[in-house]
Image: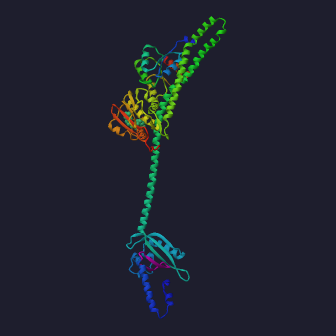
Amino acid sequence: MAFFEYSVFVMSGDIEDLPERIRELELKRNQLRTLIDNIPDPVYIKDKQCRFINANDRLLRIAQLENLEQLVGKTDRELFPHELADSYHRDDQAVLQHGATISKDEPGIDHRGEPIVVHTYKAPVRDRETGEIVGLVGIGRDVTEITQARDQLQRSAEDLQQQKEELSATLDQLKQAQAHLVQSEKMASLGTLTAGVAHEINNPINFVYAGVNSVLRDFADVKQVVTEVRNLSSRADPAEAISRLDQLCQDCGFDDAFEALEETLNDIKFGATRITEIVAGLSRFSRLGNEAWQITDIHEDIDSVLVLLKNKYKTGITVVKEFERALPQVECFPGKLNQAFMNILSNAADAIQANGGEGVVTIATSQSERFARISIRDDGVGMDEATCHRIFDPFFTTKAVGQGVGLGLSITYSIIQDHSGNLAVESQPGKGSEFLVELPFKHPTPKPKQT
Amino acid sequence: MSSATQTKKYTILYVDDEQSNLRVFKNAFRRDFNILLSPSAKEAMELLKENAVDLLITDQMMPEMTGVELLRHIKELYPNVPPSRVMLSGYALPDDIELAYSEYHLHRFVSKPWDEDKFKQVILEAIKAAER
Ligand SMILES: Nc1ncnc2c1ncn2[C@@H]1O[C@H](COP(=O)(O)OP(=O)(O)OP(=O)(O)O)[C@@H](O)[C@H]1O
Ligand SMILES: [Mg+2]
C-alpha cells in the first residue's frame, strides 16, 4: 500500500501540530471516502498482482461483500465468473506490464448477478519517484441501457436504410414496368399500324408497279405503229402502205394498247397520290412522344386513323361519318389524340367482329361552348355494367390472349386527361356501345405535363 | 403475236374491290388470257353462273365479303368448278390463308404488289395443276 501513505504530508508539518494535522487528514480522508463511495459506478484499485487493495461501496455490492476488508487481497477470479475474470485479468496485465490504458465496453454483472454491459476504464498507477508501475485504478460504468438504446438505434437506422433501398428498388421496378407498358402498347399499335399500312400501301404500289410494266408493253405496241406511220411518206405505194398499217394495228392490238396506256397512266398517278397520302397520314399519326400543342382539324385526324385501320375496317363494317361541318379546330397533341381515337375505333371494330362481323360504326362530331364532342358508336357486342366499370383498368380485357392486352382504354383515358377532356361510355349488351370524347378547344393553362 | 391468238385462251376471273387493280391486271394479261373482272364477291358469283372459268383470282380484303369467304361460297355452290383458285392480297392474316389452303382449294397465295412474269408463271401453274 505504499502509494496510499500520507507520510510526505505528515513529515512536512510541525511536530506540535501533529494531532491537529491528523484530524485534518482524517477529515479529508473521510471526505474522499464519502466521495468515492457515492460515485454510482464501481471504482477500485489493484496492486501489481491484480489484487484488490481498495474499492468503493458500489464494487462491494457487486462483489456481494459486506466490507472492504473482505475484498482486500482478493482477485477477480475469486469474485466473478471465470470467463469474465479471465478477460479482466488480461486487460489488467496489459495495464500493469505495458502501461496501457483500457477504455472499452465489455460484459459484466450487476449487484443482482444479472449480466450487463460495462464500460471499463483502467489506467496504471505509478510510483511518484521512480515512475514504476505499482498498480492500477479502474472504474466500470453500467452502459447496458445506453448500449441497448444505441443498438436499437443502429438497428432502426439499418431498417430504415433497408426500407429506403427496398423503396427505391420498388420505384425502379415500377418505372421499368411503366416504360414496359407504354412500350408494349406502342408495339401493339405498331402491329395494328403495320397491318393497316401494309394493306393500304400495297394496293396503290400494285397500281404503280404492275402499271409501269403494262405501260412499257403497251408503249412497245404503239411504237411499232408510230414507226410505221413515220415511214408512210417514203413508201412507194401509199394505198398498200395504209392497208399494211391497218393490218399492223390489228396484229399488235393498237387500239387496246392505246386505250390501256391512258387508263394505266391514270391508275399510276392515282396510286402515287394515294401512297403520298398514306405516308402523310402515317407521319401525322406517328408524332407521338414529345410533341407540342398544335391546332388541328379533328376530322382530318379521324380520317387518317381510319386509313390506318383500313384492314380492320374493310370487311363487314360500314363507317358512317356525321361530322359537324363548322366544328372549330382543337388545340391538342395530335399524335396522342390519334392514338386515343385509334384505340376506341379499334375496339369498335373488335366489338362488331365479336358480334358476327357485320355492323355500323358511327362517328359523330358536335360542339358545345367550350368543347368539341366526338361520339364513336358501334352496334357490336356491347358490355354489361360490370364490364363497363372496369374497361379503363389497365390490363382489363375480355379478349383472347394475343387479341388484346387490355391497355388500349387505360391509355386512351390518360391521353384524354392530358387534354383536360372527358371520356364517357354507354353500352348495352347485345346492342352496342358509345364512347363520347369531349375536348376543350383551347388547352387550359398551366399546360399538362408532357411525357 | 399471231400465235397467241391461235392457241386456246384460258379464261380468268379476277375479283378485287379496287378498280385500278382490276384495270392494271387486265392490261397486263389481256394479251395472254380472256379476262373477266368483278369489283365484288357477289358479282363474281353471278359471273360464275354464266361463264366457264379456268382460274379464279381474288383479293382477300374486300368490303362485304372477303376472298376466303368467296372461296367458301364457291366451294359450297360448285363443289367441282372452277377447279383452280389463286388468292391475292396486300395483307392477310396467316390463319385465313391456312384455312383457304386446307379447305377451299386455294392453289397459291400471292402478295401485292405482284411481278408480272412471276404472276404469269403462278397463273399457268395453277391452271395446269387443275387440268391434271
Ligand atoms: N366498343 C366496345 N364494345 C364492347 N366492349 C368493349 C368496347 N371497347 C372496349 N370494350 C371492352 O373493354 C375491354 C378493354 O378494352 P381495351 O381497349 O382497354 O383493351 P383491349 O381492347 O382488350 O386490348 P388492347 O390493349 O389491345 O386495346 C375490352 O377487352 C372489351 O371487353
Ligand atoms: Mg383495345
Which image quadrant for residue A144?
bottom left
Above or below — where is A417 with respect to B105?
below
Q: Nearer the viewer, residue A380 or A160?
A: A380
Q: Was residue A333 drawn as part of the magenta stretch in this picture?
A: no
Q: Nearer the viewer, residue B48 or B19?
A: B19
Q: Residue at x 43, y 55 (%)?
A: A163
Numbered-mark total: 0
For the record, the magenta segment spans A39-56
Left or right of residue A252: residue B77:
left
How is colour applied across the structure in the image?
Answer: rainbow
Ligand 1: give its quadrant. top left
Q: Nearer the viewer, residue A426 or A205?
A: A426
> Which percent across, then down, holds residue A435?
38, 35
Q: Residue at x 49, y 36 (%)?
A: A286
Q: Nearer the viewer, residue A348 or A27?
A: A348
> Which percent across, then down, holds residue A140?
44, 73
Q: Residue at x 35, y 39 (%)?
A: A389
Using the rendered image of the protein, determine whether residue B121 is visible from the camera's viewpoint: no
> Which percent across, then down, holds residue A56?
42, 79
Using the rendered image of the protein, determine whether residue B41 is visible from the camera's viewpoint: yes
Left or right of residue A49: residue A353:
left
> Which percent across, then down, holds residue A176?
47, 45
